[in-house]
Amino acid sequence: MLSFEIMNISSPLILQQAVAEIEKCNDFTSQFGLMLAHRDAVELVETRALALKNNGRIEFGGGVLDKIIREFCHSPYISMYNYAETLHDLTEIFYFYKNETLDLLSDDDLLKFMKDSFDGKCQGSLELLAGRALANMARQLRYGDDMNESEPLTNAEEDEDDEY
Amino acid sequence: MTNIEKHYIIDPNSLSSESYFASLLQEAYICGLLSALDIEKIQMQCLAFLAYKSERYNGGESSSIRVEVAENIMKSNLYTIGLYLKSLPDADCAANELKTATISEMYQKGRGIINVKFQAAQHVYKLTQKNKMDTLNYTYNATLNDDGIGIFFKTYNPNFEAHEIPAAIDYQLCNSATDLAGVEFIQKYLESLYFENEFCANFAAADIHHLLFGYDEGYQDLLINIFEQVLTAALGCSLAQRNVMKLAISADEIQSLQKELSSYDDHALSIMVAKATEKVLDELNIVSLPLQRYIEQSLPKITTSIAQALKTNNLDKVFISPVNPGLISKIEFSSGVKMDDANYRKLINELLICRYSADKLSLINESVKSFDDLEDVLFDAQLNEGEITMVFSMLENVELAALLRRHPFKSNIQAVDLSEAEQAVRLSLKKYINHLPTDRQEQIFKIMTCLTAEKQAVFQ
């Protein structure tokens, strides 16, 4: 009873608050034709909790979900058809790369990089985003290189990219 | 007479000094000073405060944090609050404070105490450097240096790792600072070290060196507490009615003490040691009360060692006779001239084709005139174990000692790194020495310790 177990801080109240914050984002995303139902919001919060647990992290307050939504809602590669599913994947990718980048990047910088890569050379591919762009950036960051100076894709790599 | 001592609801002995906050919550709940609701409220406040501190840790740039980092921040917060609660008059008062004050308020007060303790520790660190002992002991010197305990003052992070002790502290104190953490530990450690230095400053560095050399000639590399050795020796001198200042007690006096003290039970022995301590304090004119108290705290440990040694008839392991390394006779060798390569090759070829062991031995006896050549022959001539043993039997004690010093057989594990020939020689030498009469073995070992580091022997 007297322990300070900080892994189990997801009280129902905090979860409800997080769901409400996500639903509130609908006001902003509706202009792009993107809406999340209550059930979607609950599932997204659950995905966040699982991603945090799997990556050995904890988050206080509303978290980063509303930032992900606001950053990606105007992506040309996201529509109502893949909106919720993409958010689930982006949430998992985000927390994974927070660890991989050794917490050296702020949430905003990481999200900006993800958005630019997703809309840019990954052309909406989550596999390329996670497996190539972010992986390269994390490796360069760990070895002390500038993250903007990523290796140019060779012809062979470009061919590989086409497979996605 | 009526006892007017205040009665406390929480037993202070049941509280942990290291995790004061958590243990206080536990005890306050058990004693009924805090309800389950109070505890829950405090826990929620702690989590809210952790959220605030995590945000500060991230500089507001990240909403999530690694679990281990958050746990560390939580420990740091609880430690800081614990420091404040510990500063209150008693545990009941601290439990009451938990009900009335917020976590944030208590943390701020605890943080203030950390600042004060940090500065106090820094001051004591300077004092310990001033009264530092002049000794060869490595751990003592390495600990009391800017790369040892000094690191703490450069790297301590009271905001997020207040409970950590980022310093290289290998030197063990006589009264170790247990059940403490963070700056509290460092302050206590340095204060204790200061007292130990202060006591040892009453003796000449050379006398302490001789005492420790008597304890172990390799004391430079040992993890020993110098103060404990010095105090024990001073007590020994006092018990033997000797002058304390020189820390010199002879083997005969130790024997007499063994006879005299054996008749005492533990209680009587404690009284004897306490009286001897008073004499030591008088003789050294130690008037500082904190130092006297520190010495008194060290007595139970020393008394137990004495009692144990008396029971096992090993008082000479507790009271040490000093040894002046400068007065130990040394044996210095000058190696004979090695034979030239052509002659050596010729000798080895002859030995390899030689059929009988007796012929090999006479050949070695005739041709080998230097200790280094003998070593080479042992490795190169492919002698069997019996022949190697026969070569050893031709050697005098001093040569065997020199050989043993160069080629000790310590363990099978160590032998793995050696060549097959060297393994065979070392093993044969060990077996040969073990089969010698005990008094001859002792003579050889004694000579070994007297050999100078430059081990060059004359083989005649």
Image (tube, rainbow, N blue to C red):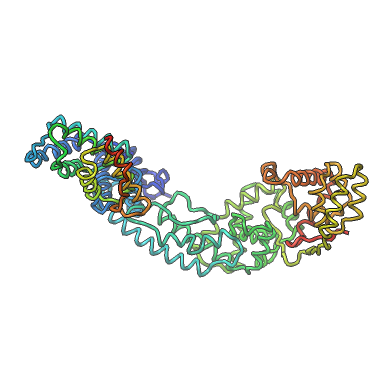
Looking at this view, is B112 or A64 the one in front? A64
Which quadrant does the C terminus of chain B fall into?
A: bottom right
Any part of residue A105 in sight: yes
Q: Is residue B175 left or right of residue B207?
A: left
Quadrant location of residue B240? Answer: bottom right
- Where does the image place residue B279, in percent across and percent down from the top left? 62, 63
Give the camera-side residue of B225 and B175: B225
- Compared to residue B285, the image places residue B370 above or below, namely above
Q: How many numbered marks does the figure carry?
A: 0
Kindly identify the residue that appears in the image at 47 percent across and 50 percent down. Answer: B178
Residue B208: percent from the left, percent from the top? Answer: 64, 64
Q: In percent of the image, x 46 and y 62: which residue is there?
A: B150
Furthest residue in direction top, as rendered: A39
One can see residue B92 in this view: no
Q: Nearer the viewer, residue A10 or B324?
A: A10
Name the residue furthest front: A155
> Which residue appears at 84% of the width and 55% of the height?
B344
Residue B229 in picture, x, y percent from top left: 62, 58
Name the residue nearer the viewer: B90 or B47. B47
Position of A68 with respect to A136 (left or right) is left
Residue B364 placed where, x, y %?
89, 52
